[in-house]
Image: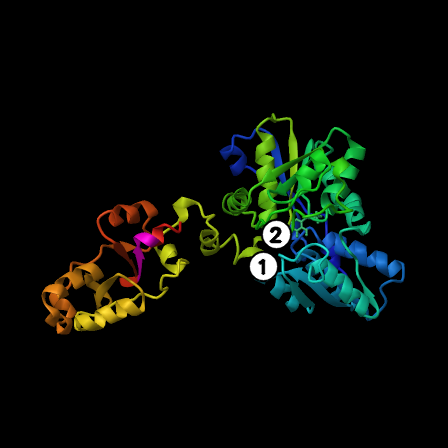
Amino acid sequence: MKVYESVLELVGNTPLVKIKNLTRQFGIKAQVFAKMESLNPGYSVKDRIAISMVEDAEKKGILKPGGTIIEATSGNTGIGLALVAAVRGYKCIFVMTDKVSIEKRRYLKALGADIVICPAAAKYGAPDHYLETAKRIAKETPNSFYPDQYSHPANPLAHYRTTGPEIWRDTDGKITHFVAGIGTGGTISGTARYLKEKNPNIRIIGADPYGSIFKIYKETGKVPEATPYLVEGIGQNMPVENADMKIIDEIINITDRESFEMSRLLSRQEGIFCGGSTGTNFAAVVKIAKNLDENAVVVFIVCDTGEHYLTKHHSDEWMKEKLLLEPQKITAGLIVETKSNGAPKELIYVTPDETVAEALKKMNQNSVTQIPVLEENQSVGSLRENQVYARLLENRELLNAKVSEIMDKSFPVVHADASVEEIKAKLRDFPAVLVEEFRQIIGIITRADMLDL
Ligand SMILES: Cc1ncc(COP(=O)(O)O)c(C=O)c1O
């Protein structure tokens, strides 16, 4: 029978997949391959180190039956450790920051782990920082093991023993460039050590988010002040023991916008559904590959799956909220769904039979200066506050008149798929446009709403 003893035997031996459409699109001559770590059973590169750190602790007698694994993680190491714990009968507590996606938190809980969330804004060394919190919980928990992936030698060793040899074997030793992000540094340091031993000319490229310290730290030896960024799992605000700066030849800074755009492109044009840090890696590939010819063989890491980020950069709504969505993807429907400027989210409207006094009250209560008049969910007219008051100055009696008697013509109606250009063209002549989907008016877009894009 061709069977496996447990899911742990499925970790590693991930394939290299050729990038074709995007290399053509970016005019890249080099051969570029994605190392599909998202195909591990925990869907990330971190499954490898989970097994190697736990086996090391078992061998040394640090982790005993019934013991508890405690780790600080951006999620993926936790998922790997939780798989090992499930198979081998350990308990798990993971400490993460509130930056970690909801998907990863739920995933860990589903695997039976307990999770503790700390503020991402906590200063390094402060008691509420996630590393300090993990250390404290480990100290207080009897029969526990705190791997500390940032310093544990079994982290880079796992990549020296598996990731590096796999890439060397699968490229027939032809690899010329290796590109990876730096979180704990285990992936890049361990893989690079193996590859450089085989061929010291292989270039090792680190992909680092703007805001992280690694590029400046490598180039100057100084630790700059870190600034926030949105990509998960990579970059740091302080040097890390497992991130060997000497073995990395070059570090390239990548913006959140580039990382997420590349991650989305990999999904849509190569079918490689991946996380944001994979986008960071591929953005670095695109930058270095400009100067490479067809003899170059570039391998980059697909760190994890896009499923961990369905509510983050794979969601148009989230991308728009963060002002990162490609302009051509912003539609009228999306603008209505994601208003963030304090404007009412639900559509405020009046019917033709309501009185002018009632209409003014509604506008006042909702702090709007114009209001559509709808009948059976179709737009039949509109009221603008300044015009209504101008008429009331002449004839106060109109307060008791019906809206239909004084209403103006309807605001223009666009379909939910309408583009920003289409909406802007209409807003030149009207203070607002209405948005329609399935023949129902679903919302209103004012000039002020457009300032948020
Ligand atoms: C999504 C993601 N990408 C990349 C990495 C970086 O890997 P390493 O810690 O080996 O540097 C991590 C590590 O946590 C991660 O979670």
Q: Is residue 163 magenta?
A: no
Q: Which mark is residue 232?
A: 2
Q: Is residue 445 magenta?
A: yes
- Helix, strand or loop status at disc 2: loop
- Displayed quadrant of residue 168: top right
Foreground residue among 69 and 354: 354
Q: Identify the residue at horizontal 73%, vertical 58% (top origin).
A: 131
Image coords of residue 1 (percent x, y): 75, 59
Categorize mark 2 by other alpha carbons within 10 Å: few (<14), some (14-19), many (20+): some
- Helix, strand or loop status at disc 1: loop
Image coords of residue 297 (percent x, y): 65, 32
For the residue with label 2, is its CB less than 8 Å from the closest atom of ligand 1?
Answer: yes
Q: Are marks 2 and 1 in contact (CB under 8 Å)?
A: yes
What is the magenta range? 443-448
- Displayed quadrant of residue 301: top right
Query: What amino acid does circle 1 point to?
Result: Ser
Q: Is residue 193 visible?
A: yes
The residue pinned by badge 1 equals 101
Numbered circles on residues, count: 2
Image coords of residue 353 (percent x, y): 16, 73
Foreground residue among 46 and 101: 101
In the image, residue 96 above or below residue 355: above
Kindly report the distance in space between the C-alpha atoms of the residues bearing marks 2 and 1: 8 Å
For the residue with label 1, is its CB less than 8 Å from the closest atom of ligand 1?
Answer: no
- Displayed quadrant of residue 377: bottom left
Q: Is residue 241 left or right of residue 40?
A: right
Q: Is residue 218 left or right of residue 228?
A: right
Q: Identify the residue at horizontal 63%, vertical 61% (top origin).
A: 119
Image coords of residue 303 (percent x, y): 64, 48
Q: Earlier along the polypeptide chain: callout 2 or callout 1?
A: 1
Query: What amino acid does circle 2 point to?
Result: Glu
